[in-house]
Amino acid sequence: MRSLGVVFLADIVGYSKMMAHDEPGTLTSLREFTKNVIRPTLEKHSGTMIKSLGDGWLIEFNSASNAVNCAMDWQSISKHQGILKLRIGIHLGDVEHEEGPPPDIYGDTVNIAARLETIAESGDVVISTSTYLCLDQNQAASFTNCGKQTLKNIATPVEVWSTGRLNEGSKGLKRDRDKPVISIIPFVPGNSDLSGFSSELAESLSKYMDGKEWLDSIIQKTPSEEDYQLSGSISVVGPNFEINVTLKAPGGKTLWSGHTGATMKSISFGADQLGEQISNQLFLEIMKVRDKYK
């Protein structure tokens, strides 16, 4: 069975070395962490333990917010105790479920979560943009954008966010800062019914922006002042919806603003078309001034 899910993978850093140094003590610490931390926090945040991996855990949540809150609890407690050091990766996407027994999950979403976990530094949480876009402002503030990363055995680069730094020992983790960067701030929806469309439009804009070799794009709620910034709002006007867009240069100067829209009937398939339309205008505006803001 295939459905949308949030996959959470955690790993104990240096587990093999700990076992070699003090196997009984390490196993005792692991049992206590499982009893006193993992079980109560999974119950608190509605997580489902899929399986224990010896030195890690594969867990599924039905909410990105719950998954991130659980990860933050784990890291906070493990840092306070100072015994087990963890790294955690989280990705939201389609998950294939196998009923079992025992039950299992697999697919690209699990693979991506596993790679995100491997590029996290000790004590940090790394998440994908699909996860980040589901967080509220307070949760999102804990994460820094690390750009699009090339992950082992994953076909396309994945944009990632971290509570700290990425593991520099991993391959393909260098963002090209020679390119101008445009930060796409998810557009403010006029009502909750437009939230999904807002996320789809942000993904569409990023896709078309990345179609240009000289430009890099990032979806983020708190952009750097060094980047171009694209923001906007989506509102319903009678039978239509309207999108107001603003492009700012590095430093905050407004370069361009405009609006577009379509009928509400077309909203289910309009994100990609509107993303392309808006992107074409943005390319023209950035081309006019990009030498000035190098």
Image (cartoon, rainbow, N blue to C red):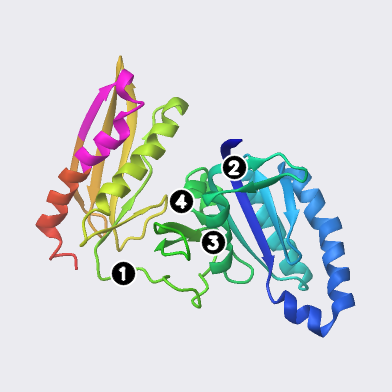
Which residue is farthest bottom?
Answer: 21
How much space separates mark 4 and mark 3, taking CA atoms? 12 Å
Badge 2 element: strand
Q: Residue flagged by tag 4: what amino acid is it?
A: Thr
In the picture of the structure, the residue carrying the numbered disc 2 is 96
Q: Earlier in the sequence, mark 2 or mark 3?
A: 2
Residue type indicated by callout 3 = Leu
Q: Secondary structure at mark 1?
A: loop
Badge 1 crowding class, 10 Å Cα cut-off, few under 14, some 14 to 19, many 20 or more, is few
Using the numbered discs, state the Cα–Cα distance from disc 3 to disc 1 in whole angstroms.
19 Å
Q: Say whether residue 230 is left or right of residue 148.
A: left
Which residue position holds label 1?
176
The CA distance from mark 2 to mark 1 is 34 Å
Which residue is drawn at the image coordinates 47% and 28% (left, top)?
192
Of labels 1 and 4, earlier in sequence is 4
Q: Which residue is labeled 4 in the image?
A: 129
Residue 230 at least partly seen: no
